[in-house]
Image (cartoon, helix red, strand yellow):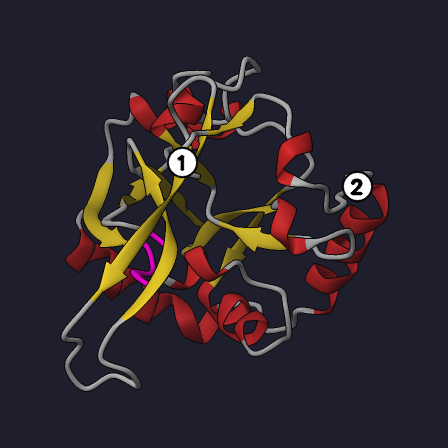
Amino acid sequence: MNLKQLRKKVISSEPHEEKNISKVLTWLKKRKRLDKTKVKIISIKSLKDWSVEMNGNIFHKSKQFFSLKGVRTTNAYNREVKKWDQPLLFQKHGGILAIFVREKNGIIEFLLNARREPGDGNSELKLCPSFSATQSNMNLAHGGKKTQLTDLVLNNKNLICKTIHFEEGARFWKKPNQNLLIFLKKNQEKKIKGKNFIWLNLSQIKKLNIKKGILNPLLKQF
């Protein structure tokens, strides 16, 4: 399936899609209750595996993930001020964001993942792309396990489309993300394991988009 074919199928699918999202919201509340993640703010000096250089830059011991460096902007056109200084996030590698697509009973559905990031705090669990990882994650620079669905993403044979988007330039320095739409065949669905995954149609996703704090911003890039 290519992007043109997907668009046609989405249009023909829409009149027959389930529009109600009450079950989705109930499911998400349950996932929130079961999620035991705790986040608290601590000092930079207390961070494990992170260091501050003599010049003030902050970096991870692996030299991967992101680092924090200072940037000076001058002669800014059509901005509030002509020049300013600020810190920006630099990342050695970009990231991959992927959404799996399937066709079930003539309806196009998208696989989303309910997950929490540290900046979401202790009360938020957002619907995110099926797969979200930086190259540092995939290199296991954190010393942990692989991101769920890594093998399915890297060994995909049914790529619908691929685009490159850059993270917000007010916070990141030229960080590219690969955005992938991947068609999943029926015999591959058994590889989707984990209770935080959910298949939703486009009508449901659109309704969730106008709810506060439900969709992860990266999902909206698609």
- 204 is higher (above) or lower (below) than 104: below
Please report the residue visible at 41 percent of the width from the left and 71 percent of the height from the top.
14
Residue on which the image places disc 2: 38
Instruction: Identify residue type, mark 1.
Output: Phe
Please state the horizontal and vertical placement of residue 163, each as a whole percent of the image: 19, 50
Front-most of 44 and 209?
A: 44
Q: Is residue 169 magenta?
A: yes
- Please give the label number shown on residue 66: 1
Mark with earlier residue (2, 1): 2
Q: Is residue 124 visible?
A: yes
Front-most of 100 and 35?
A: 35
- 163 is higher (above) or lower (below) than 148: below
Instruction: Identify residue type, mark 2.
Output: Lys
Q: How many marks?
A: 2
User: Quadrant location of residue 218?
Assistant: bottom left
- 82 is higher (above) or lower (below) than 100: below
Which secondary structure lies at badge 1? Answer: strand
| Left or right: 53 in relation to 193 | left
Q: Main secondary structure of the magenta part?
A: loop
Q: Residues within 10 Å of mark 1 (few under 14, many from 20)?
A: many
Q: Specify the farthest residue to the front.
A: 54
Please state the horizontal and vertical placement of residue 107, each as a whole percent of the image: 43, 58
For discs 2 and 1, the disc positioned in front in the rendered view: 1
Which residues make up the magenta segment?
167-172
Front-most of 33 and 83?
A: 83
Please state the horizontal and vertical placement of residue 64, each as a whole percent of the image: 38, 25
